[in-house]
Image: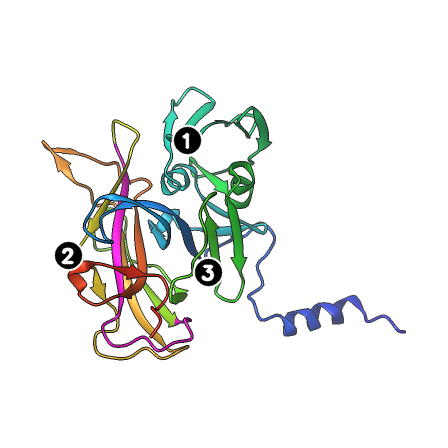
Amino acid sequence: MKKLPIALLLICCTVLSSQPAWAAGDINYDNIKLLYVGPILTDFMDGQIRVVENVPRYIFPLMSQRPFIKNGKAYLPLRLTFHILGYQIDWKAKDNNIIIYNDDDKMILNKATQKITKDGKQMDLPLLLMKGSYFVPLRDLATATGDNITWDDDTRTITYVKKGSQLVKPPVTITDIRYEPDKDRDGEFARIPYVIKNTSEATIPKDKLWYIVTEGHPALTEEEVILRQLGWPGGYSLNENQELLPNQAITHDAFVSTSVSIVNGVPRFDGSGAYEVHILGILDKDPYMRKVYWVPPLP
């Protein structure tokens, strides 16, 4: 069998590839989405404040903190990542050790050795330093924490499932997303148009597909995760005037910014790590009951 010249092989690979060619080491933000599954403290289910398990939600970080891929690994900012996962952080500027903890776990991440210690076991966690901020490779982090992470190349979605949680897919999938910065506003502000596709294999009736949006900020003086629900209690309708057939798509958008609350003239949050959470599901019966399901209820 004759061997093809190297140049011809390269041409064939270029023609057959359906993905854009990215040079090794390039940072690729193109259409990457983060679907996180884990418990959430909220009252959106029935008006009672409680922990709701296995809630899938799409995470929309600030523009400079959105997920990207570099050398085949997906990254998020260190502080933002642990906030999303429900951890608090004790991080002193002159100390290489970063203490990461919640009610159940405690980990120590050493910036110098780039190793993380949990339950007496030490594992590598190679950090990426860009423009003065540390970024975490999500797959390496999931290995250290025992969480689960997958990559869907068709929708370019990172699905991160926290240990102890179970992935129950929402009835719709975000297939396309982009960030549009607004240079006329103070601070970091971006509109995020996205496309939602019905992947439930069932028709979603009018006014049954809803979303609930929440917002998270780290505090200025104390390391804590502030998560507040935005908008009216029942959420917002996405298909108010139309049925959503299987595989049919509709468009929507989100907004993220560094806008923060002011307490006694002082910003309550520093804006870094701020993000929006969009929870997509089927609203059953009375909207005021706020019973949201991740898959359409049976007929």
> In front: 166, or 5?
166
Q: Position of residue 257 (x, y in %)?
A: 26, 49
Q: Label 3 near label 2: C-beta < 8 Å?
A: no
Lower sequence index among marks 1 and 3: 3
- The answer to whether residue 64 is left or right of residue 166 is left
Kind of residue at disc 1? Asp
What residue is shown with label 2? Answer: 232
> In front: 196, or 257?
196
Toward the right, the furthest residue is: 1
Q: Label 1 near label 2: C-beta < 8 Å?
A: no
In three-dimensional space, the C-alpha distance between marks 2 and 3, rounded to whole angstroms, equals 32 Å
Task: Determine whether the residue tagged by mark 1 lies in a helix, strand or loop.
Answer: loop
> In front: 222, or 147?
147
Few, some or many residues within 10 Å of mark 2 (<14, 14–19, 20+): few
What residue is shown with label 1? Answer: 104
Q: Locate the N terminus and report the quarter of the image it occupies.
A: bottom right
Query: Residue at position x 26%, y 43% from top?
Result: 50
Q: Is residue 207 magenta?
A: yes
Span colored in magenta: 198-219
What residue is shown with label 3? Answer: 30
- The answer to whether residue 157 is left or right of residue 235 is right
